[in-house]
Image: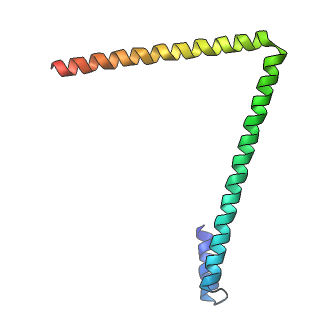
Amino acid sequence: ASILISRYALLRQLNLINPEDLLKLERIRRILNIYRTRSVFNRILRIFIVIDVVKRFYQHRNPQKYLAVLQKKLAQQEQEIAKIKQQIQQTEQLIKKISHE
């Protein structure tokens, strides 16, 4: 961005570009950034859609393997829940200890 600003400043100094043109160029730059951002967002959305389609295909093709994957995922999340409950309990004990002092 600083390189572009210095280019604009040089062109302005040489009277090759007027302030109105600078505003137009800035507006065009903003619009292009918006379109690039939309394009990236659309690509990411398409990737998620493809992942979902592949996941659904895998689901229907081999339900036993998919069930095993889901059970493993559930076990991992239950472990995470247990850790969070333990942290809650430790924090509650710390609060009680601090409040009694």
Total number of numbered discs in the rendering: 0
* Quarter occupied by residue 74: top right
* Quarter occupied by residue 24: bottom right
Q: Position of residue 56 (x, y in %)?
A: 78, 24
Q: Is residue 79 left or right of residue 85?
A: right
At x 64% / y 71%, what residue is drawn? Answer: 27
Quarter holding the C terminus is: top left
Q: Is residue 88 left or right of residue 79?
A: left
The vertical placement of 48 against 70, above or below, is below
Quarter holding the N terminus is: bottom right
Q: 45 or 3: nearer the eye? A: 45
Extreme-right residue of the structure: 61
Q: Position of residue 92 (x, y in %)?
A: 30, 18
Extreme-left residue of the structure: 101
Extreme-bottom residue of the structure: 15
The vertical placement of 19 against 80, above or below, is below
At x 63% / y 16%, what residue is drawn? Answer: 73
The vertical placement of 97 against 1, above or below, is above
At x 74% / y 45%, what residue is drawn? Answer: 43
Color style of the picture: rainbow
At x 28% / y 15%, what residue is drawn? Answer: 93
Q: Is residue 32 left or right of residue 79?
A: right
Q: Position of residue 100 (x, y in %)?
A: 16, 18
